[in-house]
Amino acid sequence: MNINNSRDQLLVNLMSAAVRRNQVLTGNLVNQNTPGYTRQTVEFEDILAAEFRSETPDLLSVEPVVLDDILTPKSADGNNVNMELEMTGLMQNRLQYELYSTILAGRMELMRSAIQGGR
């Protein structure tokens, strides 16, 4: 097993994207009462999937992209933060991060076991 396995690096990249998404969602919540604030989203998984389908995929080069959400309707003060949407996003993001970290921890445990000769 290669210690610098690209699958492990992909898991680390997925975790990093989840951290970035958490920052953006938290920022949205902080600004829920800021007039004119446009909520932001993080695109990563869709970009990763598109790269995977490309002719010569380079999955490790994919970076999360922060976008302004122009689709969610704005309130009278020009703000479009939806607390329910942000909280749901935070919960989903937490579950994804935990999944990625659990998979990575399991892979590291397998590596440690292989190095120690299965003891």
Image: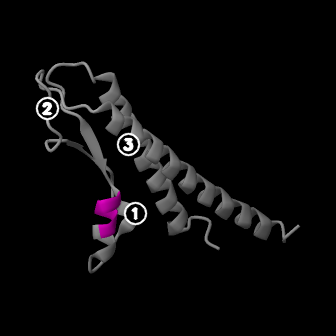
For this view, does 9 lie left or right of residue 84? right
Q: Earlier in the sequence, mark 3 or mark 1?
A: 3
**18 or 63: nearer the viewer:** 18
Q: Main secondary structure of the magenta part?
A: helix
Disc 2: CA contacts within 10 A as few (<14), some (14-19) or many (>=20): some
Question: Which amino acid, mark 3?
Answer: Arg
> In this picture, which residue range is highlighted in magenta?
45-49
Q: Which mark is residue 71?
A: none
Disc 1: CA contacts within 10 A as few (<14), some (14-19) or many (>=20): some
Q: SS for tag 1? A: helix
In the displayed image of the protein, which residue is found farthest to the bottom? 55
Q: At 25% from the left edge and 31% from the top edge, which residue is drawn?
A: 81
Task: Point out the image quarter for the C terminus.
Answer: bottom right
Residue marked by disc 2: 74
Q: Which mark is residue 21?
A: 3
Question: Which amino acid, mark 1?
Answer: Leu
Mark 2 → mark 3, Cα distance in angstroms: 21 Å
Q: SS for tag 3? A: helix
| Residue 21 in magenta stretch | no
For this view, does 119 lie left or right of residue 66? right
Question: Which amino acid, mark 2?
Answer: Lys
Residue marked by disc 1: 60
Residue 35, by quadrant, is top left
Position above or below: 28 against 14: above
Q: At 45% from the left edge and 55% from the top edge, which residue is drawn?
A: 14
Q: At 65% from the left edge and 74% from the top edge, which residue is drawn?
A: 1
Image coordinates for residue 46, horizontal then vertical, percent: 30, 61
Q: SS for tag 2? A: loop
Mark 1 → mark 2, Cα distance in angstroms: 36 Å
For this view, does 70 lie left or right of residue 117? left
